[in-house]
Image (cartoon, rainbow, N blue to C red):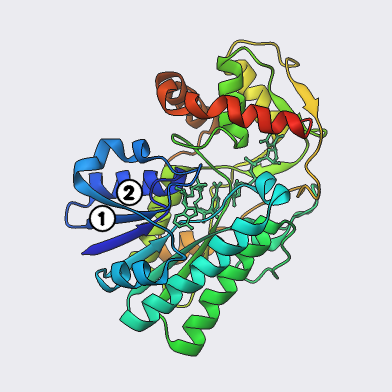
């Protein structure tokens, strides 16, 4: 089987490619990645001799047409993915997340290639802290940021291409991922690398916002379950019942590093900051029989801390620039 993975040099995509090469020797993997600030060739180093990496943009229609024409399946991870960046400059978010997804859809339509679109729970907006509800596949779209609105738009393009043109596609909306190879701009790796450097963790606002954490390997086993057994045109929500406040996450990290529970700073809040995300994954669990492997968050976090300790060469080149950028907004 010929698989094209877009964004395969990013956090989730590189984990997906590594897992696929490890577990599915019958799959020939090609990665299309623009190697933006968020993409890193070295994230594919362990499988470099088994994967073809094409450096290019999903907005390049000619390149996309050629690569899709040579594939049986496209799994589409490529995106601008960071909310804070989308508040500084939404333009690449519109280009990559909307125009890029449109470009891929036109190619899979022409070549009649199976397509899986990776998306986020942020398309649903946010929940109140005391709301018993969780997001389900029928929750109305209500995105808050330029990032989440462009992801929402990309999901709607996929749905329309399925209905209008019969494109063979599925969609998944996953909650917050953590694990190896996540960029140091994101919450958990930022705090881990701060703690390695002896810097106090930084909590936006009061730190009460809740995210529903899932280990990246569990996200990726769910993606394969949907690709293999999901129904065309359907949306599946991926989550592992991992709701934690940002404060709880920071305090768990402080405990892992042997530091006092109040050894952190409150910094400026994110404008429009979503309060809480929570996923009801029963459709995925019941229809496709998927279950997560990482059910103990502290253990998954400890393994992630160990990975960042052992792989300083991977993250160190990005750390200073990320912190300098956050300092400009008092974060
Ligand atoms: P990431 O920022 O780590 O990686 C994105 C990758 O896409 C990078 O390798 C980058 O170089 C590449 N890319 C960006 N623009 C491109 C373009 N125009 N053409 C080709 N490649 C391009 O992101 P991530 O956290 O791995 O997220 C991957 C996907 O999963 C995204 O679609 C994101 O919306 C979704 N998602 C992420 C999370 C999360 O917690 N990180 C949760 C749910 C869904
Ligand atoms: O230093 C920080 N301090 C802090 O309190 C940073 C970087 C973040 N935060 C807060 C903001 C959020 O409440 O932590 C939470 C998580 O922040 P991010 O890692 O930026 O993730 P989030 O905005 O929740 O979005 C992530 O999950 C959904 C991914 O970046 C998206 O790509 C995905 O769609």
Specify the label residue 29 is tagged with.
Answer: 1
Classify mark 2 as within 8 Å of ligand 1 or not, answering yes or no: no
Residue 72 location in percent, x, y? 26, 70
> What quarter of the picture does the C terminus occupy?
top right
Q: Is residue 178 visible to us here?
A: yes
Ligand 2 is found in which quarter of the picture?
top right
- Front position in the image: 252 or 143: 143
Q: Position of residue 100 (x, y in %)?
A: 50, 66
- In percent of the image, x 39 and y 81: which residue is there? 109
Please name the residue shown 37% across and 68% down the image: 64
Q: Quadrant of residue 150?
A: bottom right
x then y, percent, for residue 82: 61, 47
As drawn, the label of residue 151 is none
Left of 211 or right of it: where is 196? left
Asked if 192 appears above or below 235 in the picture, the reply is above
Q: Is residue 228 left or right of residue 307?
A: left
Q: Secondary structure at mark 1?
A: strand
**Location of mark 2 (residue):** 17
Q: Nearer the viewer, residue 202 or 176?
A: 202
Residue 141 occupies quadrant = bottom right
Q: Quadrant of the N terminus?
A: bottom left
User: Nearer the N terminus, badge 1 or badge 2?
Assistant: 2
Q: Confirm or deny contact between disc 1 and disc 2 (CB under 8 A).
A: yes
What is the crowding at mark 1: few (fewer than 14 residues within 10 Å), some, or many (at least 20)? many
Residue at point 54%, 69% (across, down): 99
Helix or strand or loop: what does disc 2 sit on? helix
**Which residue is depicted at the point 23% across and 64% down?**
2
Considering only vertical position in the picture, is 171 above or below 34? Answer: below
- Bin the neighbour count of mark 2 within 10 Å (Cα to Cα): few under 14, some 14-19, many 20 and up: many
* CA–CA distance in space, label 1 to label 2: 7 Å
In percent of width and height, residue 287 lies at: 44, 67
């Amino acid at each position: 089987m010929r698989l094209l993975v877009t964004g395969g040099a990013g956090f989730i995509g590189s984990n997906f490619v590594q897992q696929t090469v490890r577990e599915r020797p019958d799959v020939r993997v090609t990665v299309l990645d623009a190697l933006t600030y968020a993409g890193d060739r070295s994230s594919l180093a362990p499988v470099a001799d088994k994967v073809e990496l094409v450096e290019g943009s999903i907005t390049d229609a000619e390149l996309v047409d050629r690569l899709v024409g040579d594939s049986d399946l496209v799994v589409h991870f490529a995106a601008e993915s960071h909310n804070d960046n989308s508040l500084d400059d939404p333009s690449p978010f519109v280009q990559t997340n909307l125009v890029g997804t449109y470009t891929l859809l036109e190619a899979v339509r022409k070549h009649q290639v199976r397509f899986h679109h990776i998306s986020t729970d942020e398309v649903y907006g946010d929940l109140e802290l005391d709301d018993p509800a969780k997001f389900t596949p029928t929750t109305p779209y209500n995105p808050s940021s330029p990032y989440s609105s462009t992801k929402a738009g990309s999901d709607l393009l996929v749905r329309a291409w399925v209905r209008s043109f019969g494109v063979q596609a599925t969609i998944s909306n996953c909650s917050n991922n953590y694990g190896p190879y996540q960029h140091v701009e994101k919450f958990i790796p930022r705090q881990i690398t701060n703690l390695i450097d002896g810097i106090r963790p930084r909590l936006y606002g009061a730190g009460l916002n809740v995210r529903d954490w899932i280990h990246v390997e569990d996200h990726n086993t769910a993606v394969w379950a949907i690709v293999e057994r999901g129904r065309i045109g359907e949306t599946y929500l991926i989550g592992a019942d991992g709701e934690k406040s940002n404060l709880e996450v920071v305090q768990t990290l402080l405990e892992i590093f042997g530091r006092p529970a109040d050894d952190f700073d409150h910094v400026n809040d994110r404008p429009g900051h979503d309060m809480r995300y929570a996923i009801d994954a029963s459709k995925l669990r019941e229809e496709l029989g998927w279950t997560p492997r990482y059910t103990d968050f502290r253990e998954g976090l400890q393994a992630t801390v160990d990975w960042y300790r052992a792989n300083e060469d991977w993250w160190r080149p990005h750390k200073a620039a990320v912190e300098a950028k956050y300092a400009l907004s008092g974060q």
